[in-house]
Image (cartoon, grey):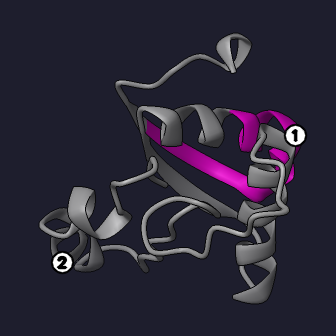
């Protein structure tokens, strides 16, 4: 999960091959960030980013997953874990913003 102007690929491209040795890795940009589309009519807020994140999991047929999030991606991971507890098995957060701040 990444911020505008930064992509998951830019942030994690060197770690993905290493993580892939032990885990199945899906590197997904949040809607409006990185390489995703930026729909003009979308309200960019946590509710829509959560909807997008769960939509990615559902589209890929993933049930319970581990999340890695940096900065805003960490805050999004925390929100996902708080809202969809049954979908999250573990998390790694780096430089994360807290839930109450977003």
Residue 82: horizontal and vertical position, in percent? 80, 33
Classify mark 2: residues with Cα within 10 Å, few (<14), some (14-19) or many (20+): few
Please give the name of the residue rendered at 72% of the width and 11% of the height, measured from the top-left corner.
100
Q: From the viewer's perspective, is 14 left or right of 45?
A: left
Residue 56: horizontal and vertical position, in percent? 71, 76
Please give the name of the residue rendered at 38% of the width and 74% of the height, measured from the top-left corner.
23
Name the disc covering residue 83, or none.
Answer: 1
> Given the current orientation, which residue lies at the most extreme left position?
14
Q: Which residues are magenta?
A: 79-92
Name the disc covering residue 17, or none.
Answer: 2
Residue 30: horizontal and vertical position, in percent? 59, 60
> Given the current orientation, which residue lies at the most extreme bottom position?
60
Please give the name of the residue rendered at 28% of the width and 70% of the height, measured from the top-left corner.
9
Q: From the viewer's perspective, is 86 left or right of 49?
A: right
Asked if the residues shown at circle 2 and circle 1 are in contact, with their CB atoms under 8 angstroms apart, the answer is no
Residue 7, relative to residue 90: is it above or below? below
**The magenta stretch spans residue 43:** no
Q: Secondary structure at mark 1?
A: helix
């Amino acid at each position: 999960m990444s911020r505008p102007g930064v992509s998951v690929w830019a942030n994690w491209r060197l770690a993905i091959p290493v993580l892939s040795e032990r885990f199945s890795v899906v590197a997904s940009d949040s809607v409006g960030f990185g390489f995703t589309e930026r729909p003009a009519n979308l309200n960019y807020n946590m509710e829509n980013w959560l909807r997008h994140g769960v939509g990615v999991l559902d589209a890929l047929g993933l049930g319970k997953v581990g999340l890695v999030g940096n900065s805003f991606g960490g805050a999004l991971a925390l929100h996902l874990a708080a809202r969809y507890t049954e979908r999250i098995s573990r998390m790694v957060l780096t430089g994360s913003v807290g839930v109450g701040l977003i």
